[in-house]
Every structure is written in structure tokens, then in C-alpha cells.
Amino acid sequence: MALPNHGANAHHVYERLGIEMPEKIMDFSENVNPLGPPAFVMERWSTYAELITKYPDPAGEPFLSAAAKYHDVSVSNIIVGNGAAELFASIAKRYENKRVVLIHPTFSEYAATLAPYHVYIKEIIAIGQLPLEEVFDEIEFAEAIYICRPNNPTGYLIPLEEIIQIVRYAKRYKCEVILDEAFLDFIDEKESFIPYLKDFPNVVVVRSMTKMYAIPGLRLGYAVGSEAFIKDIRSRLSHWNSNAIATTIGADCLQEEEYRIQAITFAKEMREGFSDFLEKWHCIVLPSTTNFLCFQLPDHARSKAFFDYLLAKGCVLRHTENFKGLDGKWFRVGMKEKAQMEHLQREMTTWFEENLSS
Ligand SMILES: Cc1ncc(COP(=O)(O)O)c(C=O)c1O
């Protein structure tokens, strides 16, 4: 039976593989900030109760204005979504019966949301650096190209200069660019494309609040782009699409500068420590810029045995069976708290000692 297409909800992996789920598991397959939501969320929790008795603001206030201020853009250039995932679902309809370029391995929701609309998908495979000439060639004939920056699952960050080159080329050929910056918060706002949007009405940037602020259960995301692009995305969303608790908490999350710096520093520290550990065991590690990384065993023929062993021990990695170009030979690991990273390394060491000659 096929493994799930997403990380998190680990019980599905156990069910599909017929492996008994241990009472305690550590889920490295999901990749939200391991430090949890900002402290104010729990401190003010009781104050959110009254929000459920009223309809939320249909435009997503107070989050809409907070996000506009955060990025120094007008509210007419932003649309608030019930998670970034909802916005991809709306964007996809724009490309009904058209040609779209996807660069794999990447987030599976691009293809999933395009699927109902008979979109012809041209796939480019690039684990790291982009084959720019191929990208340019495809842009000439495409209605849109989706780019995940930094990329999920590899953590690769296409240099900003390259993105500018791509969108410029795309503009010339009337190709739209869907730029997914869901994990950009873990790098630096200076890397965002949002300040350049003014010159590129063919680009929309999609952002998620659920990764950095560890609120995937609340659902909150947004897109920034030209007024016309934003209006079109809105036209396919339901009224009151975002909930009042998410938009209230989300607005305050954007104030949390210190929290963000701490999360970025922590993710870097965990990622570097884990990379060193993997390299010591001769694994191949993809250099990541965000809060997860991908690695391959020195002998990828042992990948399934390794994955199943860790599942039995309660450590859930993200398989890569559904990521084109990675094809199950790699694993993605979301950074967790120090104690959990150490626990994973102990379990992995046991398997390595029994199965790899160092
Ligand atoms: C690259 C990427 N973009 C967008 C999303 C969706 O984020 P949200 O939780 O805001 O719907 C995800 C979720 O895993 C993701 O990995």
C-alpha cells in the first residue's frame, strides 16, 4: 500500500506498513518549529474563547493589516488563506487546460491541486542547483512555473539573483511564477522576493504561518501579489475562509522578532550538528538552509530496512517515495528539540553499528 504523501499524522505510516506503533513516538517527518508556538499563545488562550461566538472578518483582519505592515505592502496586495494549502487550491484553477512547469522533488500539493484541472505538467528534476537553460526553455511555452524557495524537501535555496533572472524571463514570455516561501522565515526576510513584486505582476508569493510559528492546527497562510492576481485568488475562496482565532494569533505572531531569531539560530544549530553526525557515518547530506534536511545512507539499498527499524523504535522519518528525483532513497528529517535529536542519533548509531562498516 502506498505511503502517505505528507509528513505528520504518523499513525498513517504505521498503518500502511503494518508496523505496530509504539506508545511513544518522535515524529521527525513533520517540519514545524520544534520550539512550539510563541509563549503569548498559551498565556492569552482564554481570551480567544469569545472569538468563537462571532463570525470572523471576511478579509482575515486583524491578520491582513498586520501582514501588510510586516511586508510594507498594501492590504489590496494580500489575500489571507486557511493555510497556504488553501491558496494553492485556488491558484490551480487559473491554469485549467494550460501548461505548467514543476521542479521536482518538491511539495506534492502543487501537482495535487492542479490535477483536477487537466493541467499539462512539464516536470524538471533538480535536486540542487537549477538547470537554468532548461527552465528558460520551458518558461517560453508555459502558463506558469511553481518554485519552492527554500525547497521542501531538499532545503535548497535558489539564489535570489537567479530567481530575479527567472521571473524576468517569465515576464517576457507572459509566464506566471508561483513562488512558495513557506519556509523562508527560517532563513532571513532579506531573502524574500516580496520587495521585488512591484515590478513583477506575473509573480505571486505564497507564505505560511504554520511552520515558523508552530500552528499547523490553526491553519493560516497568505499570498502577496498584484491586485489583479490577488482578486482572482479571492474569487474562488469561500466567504469567512479564515478563522478568527488564527487571524488574531497570527497578527500577534508577526510581532515576535526575538522568537524568530531564536528559532532560526536553533534550527541552524540542530541542522549542523545532525549533518556532522550523518557525515561521520558516510551518509550523503543535502546542504539545507531551513529546519529540515535530507540525507541518503551510504548504501541506499538498505533504506527500507533502516526506515522500518526506526519506526519500530518510535522514530518516524519522512520517507521520500513520492518525491520525484529522491524516489525513496533519501530521508527528510525535521529538526526537533535537542533531546529528541540526540535520541534519534542514538537509535541510528545502533543501526549503523550493526549494519554499516564504518
Ligand atoms: C513547501 C510548503 N508550502 C506550503 C505548505 C502548506 O502550508 P500550510 O500549513 O500553511 O497550509 C507546506 C506544508 O507542508 C509546505 O511544505
Image: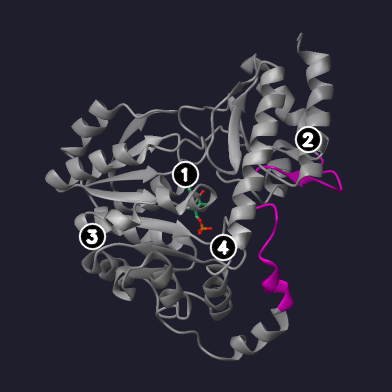
Q: How far across and how far down the image is residue 245, in percent?
A: 58, 78
Tag 1 or tag 2, which sits nearer the N-term?
Answer: 1
Q: Is residue 254 left or right of residue 25?
A: left
Tag 4 or tag 1, which sits nearer the N-term?
Answer: 1
Tag 4 or tag 2, which sits nearer the N-term?
Answer: 4
Q: Which residue is mark 3?
A: 198
Residue 158: image quadrant is top left
Q: Which residue is mark 1?
A: 107
What is the three-letter code of the residue carrying label 4? Glu
Label 2, label 4: how many angstroms apart (C-alpha)?
30 Å
Q: What's drawn in magenta, residue-wise? A: 20-43
Residue shown at 55%/91% (left/top)? 54
Vertical order, 357 against 121 (above or below): above
Local crowd size for mark 2, using a 10 Å CA cut-off: few (<14), some (14–19), many (≥20): many
What is the three-letter code of the residue carrying label 3? Lys
Is 33 within the magenta? yes
Question: Where residue 295 is drawn, which disc sits there?
Answer: none
Label 2 residue SS: helix
Q: Which residue is mark 4?
A: 257
